[in-house]
Amino acid sequence: MNILIAPDSFKGSLSAEEAARAMADGVRNAVPEADIQIVPMADGGEGTIAALSTLGDRRTVTVADPLMRPVEASYLVMEHEGKPAALVECAQSSGLTLLSEQERSPMNANTYGLGEQIRAALEAGFRQVIISLGGSATNDGGLSMLQALGWKLYDQEGQELDSSGNPLLQVASFSDQEVHPAVRETRFLAMCDVMNPFYGEEGAAYVFAPQKGASKQEVLLLDQALKQLSRLFSTAYGVDVQKTKGSGAAGGLGGAIVSALGGQLVSGIDLVMELTGIEQHMKRADLILTGEGSLDGQSLLGKVPVGVARLAKKHDKPVLAIAGRLGEQLEALHPYFVGLFSIQMDCYPQEEAMREDVASRQTRQTVEQLLRLYAYKHHCQIR
């Protein structure tokens, strides 16, 4: 029996690799003779570099965190479409997990550190930069990222803004006359798993800023500022970011990348599947196991398990998915999966259930029971 294991991380509990190892242990406990292939996955957000780490080498740089304090981040040196590329992860410099609960406020946080990550890759000679969006603590429309790459930002009085805080709330104009020369020579791809516009009720501020600590009044201020910034981008670069699906990703970073950087937004899960070559592994698999922390109807919007299952459907391969939590509208997922299963085998409080050791054990136990049933059904030897 050939088993392909391709989960995302169980956020707050297990990395994609840790989840995959626990799933593999469950398979071995049930069917010792199974041939197991592990391919950790990501949707283009937090954890993407970890999931793709076998594809290249990491380089570490010291950059600013969302509050302009030094933090170590890395980028992954790899190959994409036959050319050298640097994969940069937004969450490593501008991520929500870098801040305490008390520090979280998109009115203060910025993406300057992401710009420093990109600049480090450019100065190392890379002219193809892939940016993993997601997990950000910010809602600055990507302005601080641009500052780190040489853009000058000005307020209504024509005074240049410094790099502290969120410049979105003050910017009235900008200049790209002193941009790092490598920017115009570089291809930028941004991996995202959302389709939100730049502003409005489905935009970056309304949908994501409350998760990052914004009050209702602050959401209104941020949304109006994003609307103003969209006009600046349109005037300068001829790009209507509001009409670009995904421009609201990572607090508007998507919009800055497609307009100011001339980049392209791509499906995170689709690009990760391409980079890992998972389709070749699928062709020889008898069964595919996937999963992530939570599964519900929203998982259709670019999440790993559905991306894996859609590709598997192309090859008529059965897929089982597990999750720490099963939510509403699961019937929307049924066309893609043989079954959806929660790993919660014991009644733990949430904090305890999310501990690494508990999540790993419950993942292993759940997969073992599923594989025992699957093996019995297919007349395979069970331990």
Image (spheres, helix red, strand yellow):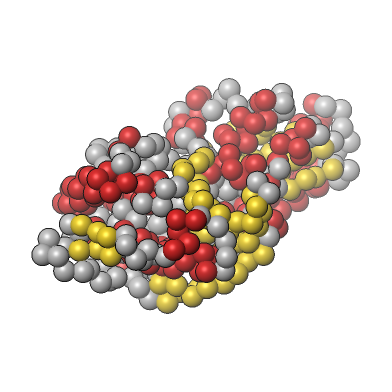
- Most foreground residue, 244 or 37: 244
25 relative to 213 in the view: left or right: right
Q: Residue at x 20, y 48 (%)?
A: 228
Quarter placement of the N terminus: top right
Q: Residue at x 37, y 43 (%)?
A: 247
- Most foreground residue, 253 or 221: 253
Q: Residue at x 61, y 29 (%)?
A: 310
The answer to whether residue 45 is visible is: no
Residue 329 lies, in percent from the top left, at 45, 28
User: What count of labels does the image hold?
Assistant: 0
Residue 103 lies, in percent from the top left, at 31, 68
- Determine whether 176 is above or below 366 in the image: below
Residue 220 lies, in percent from the top left, at 18, 48
| Quadrant in the rendering for residue 65 | bottom left
305 relative to 55 in the view: left or right: left
- Determine whether 15 is above or below 239 in the image: below
- Determine whether 44 is above or below 382 in the image: below
Residue 116 lies, in percent from the top left, at 44, 68
- Most foreground residue, 127 or 130: 127
Quarter placement of the C terminus: top right
Q: Residue at x 68, y 60 (%)?
A: 56
- Determine whether 199 is above or below 212 in the image: above
The answer to whether residue 1 is visible is: yes
